[in-house]
Image (spheres, grey):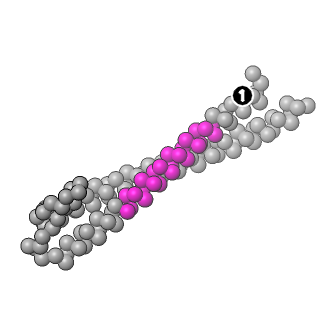
Amino acid sequence: MSSLSVLEAKLEAESKAFQQLQKELSSAIESRQRLDSQQQENEVVRKEFEHLEDDASVYKLIGPVLVKQEKAEAETNVKNRLELISKEIERVEKQLKDLTTKSEKKKAEIAELQMQYQQQQPSASK
């Protein structure tokens, strides 16, 4: 196997690895956007609780049914949900950072392999 075909195989493998990283990055970005949306929705609910009287009726949608819930319990649930979402956002942010770093490294490796390939190509055709 010539060094040129070895480089071709490496280049192909690295390109596939880069494409996989890009898919993972895209998936992490979608997760982050979904979490942002959930966080905003829960913040709106939390702010609405501030305008309610302590004895106000609060209902929770469970499937197709509205179930009465204590205001304090509902507030606690929303607060806990917001904490969970914040922790998940931190985790996804770390994942995004790691994937971006890996992706940049992989891109540099591919560029280096492409340079090596192009430098060896003319010598192989002589």
**70 to the left or right of 44:** left
Which part of the image, by quadrant, shows the N terminus? top right
Q: Which residue is mark 1?
A: 6
Q: Residue at x 66, y 42 (%)?
A: 110
Which image quadrant for residue 72? bottom left
Secondary structure that dominates the magenta span: helix
Give the magenta part as a residue range.
14-37
35 in the magenta segment: yes
The front one of 102 and 50 is 50
Which image quadrant for residue 113? top right
- Circle 1: element type: helix
Q: Residue at x 28, y 65 (%)?
A: 42
Q: How many marks?
A: 1
Does residue 92 appear anywhere in the picture? Answer: yes
Tell me where residue 76 appears, x and y as whole percent.
17, 61
The front one of 57 and 48 is 57
- Measured along the vertical axis of the image, is residue 86 above or below residue 106? below
Which image quadrant for residue 75? bottom left
Tell me where residue 88 appears, x and y as whole percent.
34, 53
Does residue 102 appear anywhere in the picture? Answer: no
- Measured along the vertical axis of the image, is residue 66 above or below residue 56? above
In the orientation shown, which residue stands out farthest toward the top? 1
Which part of the image, by quadrant, shows the C terminus? top right
27 in the magenta segment: yes
Tell me where residue 64 appears, x and y as whole percent.
23, 57
Tell me where residue 63 appears, x and y as whole percent.
23, 54
Name the amino acid, label 1. Val
The front one of 90 and 84 is 84
Q: Residue at x 45, y 51 (%)?
A: 28
